[in-house]
Image (spheres, rainbow, N blue to C red):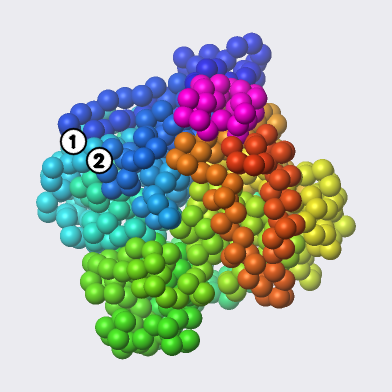
């Protein structure tokens, strides 16, 4: 499956992968059952799948059995960086986590998560592009990596500790400069919405991979590296990073308003904003002046907890989620997940104090702190909530009408429904199509969120005329972005963004800022969607055009679809999103099921998948250099005739 990819050296001729730039060349493979350490050649996979999400999918196809349970020792926790991880590329401090996800519904299936911070960079400095963990340790364990020295150590003294204390103890044990990923009580207790935490606010949240670590008796991985990442064209790369940093800055109105709404005067990056740092509520907390600080930190929704007063209570709830290792998005208070569902159920008399076994105070941060504790330790009603909203509804047998669950085990996320933010119609049609085809919430930031932020609102920095011109240039038609359009021309932007997101997750860079479709400085409002290709080429020395990278993104997406098909995925599963989108949006607009099914037909046809089954056709897989994948699907009777 991993033949050479069609790339060229910037100086012409064949690419020589003996000299590795961007990547560092090895992936660790650790079997906890046998306490065995092995290595994979990164370049075996990088030639076709780049890194991150792409390499994770390739390894999953080769090594994961389709019927394995999330908590089985046979499940693998696949953690992969990319060629830009640990470099100056904006928002590139990321890595991908993948495997059979406990959170997935109605049964666990393969998917991925993503995390920022410094762990991925430190892992590469130690000489590794990723780690695969398989098996199950006999007792609580952690992994210590210092360059070429890898140890599987006893973690009895760490088991039961929260994520903050765990990291502090490992810092004290191994010294300054170490980076750690770990689980808290939620992961240890196999909570399906458990996170893998790094630092105080970085997490691999979606999927429940913290519980996968817990099922393997793996408390933490700590790494210290002394090596370097080679860059093919260092001078050009630095200049390109400076240029990219300016291109991917947020629109002025968004950046300024969010900062003024939640932030004190202090450090805030132009790319979007900081997380809990600099909040207005911390007026008496001393800060630090940084003369120079190169940062690409992004903020999503940590300020949501500030709806509680006194402020300290809301902040405590936010930090408890991080300490316990519980996914914020699945419990964010009153907006999504358990919080939104519980609010609605209580308001309508479906869930009572008798059900919870405690007084209900929905506006109290103390109440939600207790809920978080019960979830993390699976105590009382927390044992039910620990299963996630879809399974909670199945167990309790009530509350389905208020579920924020869209599909596949994941809650509302920028889909224009049941949430105070999100795109308006017709933009949420693309979100619906992305939701239908993915294995998790599809992260529709780069289409729906960006249109909303940049253009589709009064006083936006990009005019409707400019937006239409960008739509025609990028997607082939103005109808792809026209706010007056309907179901027509929505499959094309869906496919474009699916491919590009697969690329961005493989480099990896943050989908909040890449691709850079819009610009606040260019005359036509168009950014620079070739940035990823430019950054990749100058970092690795492998010349790749924007179109070539998008083709790799399409290959990754088709491989992930093949994994789903091997697991039993069909068009019927894709259509499971329809009931959710038939609920009215904020303007009262509902999905038209028949029109949406026609849109799905168009999507399958454009993708080269069979509209009847939703399965990729042989010619499509072979076009993407996935002939062996097609052969396997043929053997199991899941290749269209």
Residue found 37% across the figure and 30% down from its top:
63
Q: Which image quadrant is residue 500 in?
A: top right
Q: Position of residue 382 (x, y in %)?
A: 29, 71
Q: Which residues are magenta?
A: 616-641
Count residues near mark 2 (Cα–Cα under 10 Å), then give few for <14, some for 14-19, many for 20+. some
Taking 626 as reference, is 581 above or below it? Answer: below
Q: Position of residue 451 (x, y in %)?
A: 72, 59
Q: Is residue 57 among the parts visible in the rendering?
A: yes
Cα separation, mark 2 vs mark 1, equals 8 Å
- Foreground disc of the pair 2, 1: 2
Query: Is 186 on the left or on the right of 429, as rendered?
Result: left
Query: Is 257 on the left or on the right of 152, as rendered?
Result: right
Q: Quadrant of the C terminus?
A: top right
Query: Is 272 on the left or on the right of 489, as rendered?
Result: left
Count residues near mark 1 (Cα–Cα under 10 Å), then give few for <14, some for 14-19, many for 20+. few
Q: Position of residue 129 (x, y in %)?
A: 40, 32
Residue at image mark 1:
33
Q: Is residue 525 among the parts visible in the rendering?
A: no
- In this orientation, which residue lies closer to the viewer: 109 or 27? 109
Taking 562 as reference, is 295 above or below it? Answer: below
Residue at image mark 2:
73
Say whether marks 2 and 1 touch (CB < 8 Å): yes
- In this orientation, which residue lies closer to the viewer: 17 or 520? 17
Choose the circle earlier in sequence order: 2 or 1.
1
Residue found 45% across the figure and 46% down from its top:
112
């Amino acid at each position: 499956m991993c033949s050479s990819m069609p790339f060229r050296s910037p100086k012409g001729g064949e690419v020589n992968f003996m000299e590795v730039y961007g990547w560092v060349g090895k992936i660790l493979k650790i079997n906890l059952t046998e306490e065995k350490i092995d290595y994979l050649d990164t370049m075996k996979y990088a030639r076709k799948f780049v890194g991150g999400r792409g390499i994770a999918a390739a390894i999953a196809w080769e090594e994961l059995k389709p019927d394995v349970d999330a908590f089985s020792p046979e499940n693998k926790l696949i953690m992969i960086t990319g060629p830009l991880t640990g470099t100056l590329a904006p928002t590139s401090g990321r890595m991908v986590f993948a495997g059979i996800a406990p959170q997935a519904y109605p049964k666990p299936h393969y998917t991925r998560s993503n995390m920022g911070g410094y762990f991925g960079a430190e892992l590469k400095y130690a000489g590794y592009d990723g780690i695969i963990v398989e098996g199950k340790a006999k007792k609580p364990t952690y992994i210590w990596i210092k360059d070429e020295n890898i140890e599987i150590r006893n973690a009895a003294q760490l088991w039961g500790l929260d994520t903050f204390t765990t990291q502090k103890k490992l810092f004290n044990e191994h010294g300054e400069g170490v980076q750690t990923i770990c689980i808290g009580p939620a992961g240890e207790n196999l909570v399906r919405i458990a996170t893998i935490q790094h630092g105080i606010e970085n997490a691999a949240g979606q999927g429940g991979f913290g519980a996968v670590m817990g099922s393997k008796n793996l408390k933490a991985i700590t790494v210290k590296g002394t090596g370097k990442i080679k860059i093919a064209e260092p001078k050009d790369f630095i200049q390109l990073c400076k240029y990219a940093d300016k291109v991917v800055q947020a629109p002025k109105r968004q950046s300024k308003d969010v900062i003024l709404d939640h932030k004190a005067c202090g450090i805030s990056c132009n790319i979007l904003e900081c997380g809990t740092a600099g909040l207005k509520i911390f007026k008496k907390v001393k800060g630090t002046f940084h003369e120079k600080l190169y940062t690409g930190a992004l903020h999503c929704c940590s300020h949501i907890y500030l709806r509680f007063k006194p402020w300290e209570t809301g902040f405590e709830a936010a930090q408890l989620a991080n300490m316990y290792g519980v996914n914020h998005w699945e419990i964010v208070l009153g907006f999504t997940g358990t919080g939104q569902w519980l609010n609605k159920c209580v308001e309508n008399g479906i869930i009572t104090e008798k059900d919870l076994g405690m007084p209900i105070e929905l506006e109290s941060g103390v109440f939600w702190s207790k809920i978080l504790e019960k979830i993390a330790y699976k105590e009382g009603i927390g044992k039910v909530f620990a299963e996630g909203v879809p399974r909670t509804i199945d167990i309790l047998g009530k509350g389905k009408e208020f579920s924020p669950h869209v599909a596949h085990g994941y809650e509302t996320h920028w889909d224009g429904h049941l949430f105070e933010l999100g795109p308006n119609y017709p933009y949420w049609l693309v979100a619906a199509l992305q939701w239908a085809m993915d294995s998790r919430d599809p992260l529709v930031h780069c289409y729906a969120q960006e249109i909303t932020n940049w253009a589709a609102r009064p006083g936006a920095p990009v005019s409707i005329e400019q937006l239409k011109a960008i739509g025609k240039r990028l997607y082939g038609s103005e109808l792809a972005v026209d706010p007056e359009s309907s179901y027509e021309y929505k499959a094309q932007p869906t496919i474009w963004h699916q491919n590009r997101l697969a690329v961005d997750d493989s480099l990896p860079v943050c989908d909040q800022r890449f691709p850079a479709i819009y610009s606040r400085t260019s005359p036509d409002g168009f950014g620079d969607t070739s940035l990823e290709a430019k950054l990749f080429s100058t970092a690795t020395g492998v010349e790749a055009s924007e179109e070539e990278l998008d083709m790799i993104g399409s290959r990754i997406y088709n491989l992930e679809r093949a994994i789903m098909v091997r697991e039993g995925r069909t068009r019927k599963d894709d259509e499971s999103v329809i009931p959710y989108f038939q609920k009215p949006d904020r303007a009262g607009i509902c999905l038209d099921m028949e029109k949406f099914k026609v849109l799905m037909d168009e999507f399958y046809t454009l993708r080269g998948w069979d509209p009847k089954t939703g399965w990729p056709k042989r010619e499509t897989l072979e076009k993407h250099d996935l002939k062996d994948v097609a052969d396997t699907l043929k053997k199991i009777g899941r290749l269209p005739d």
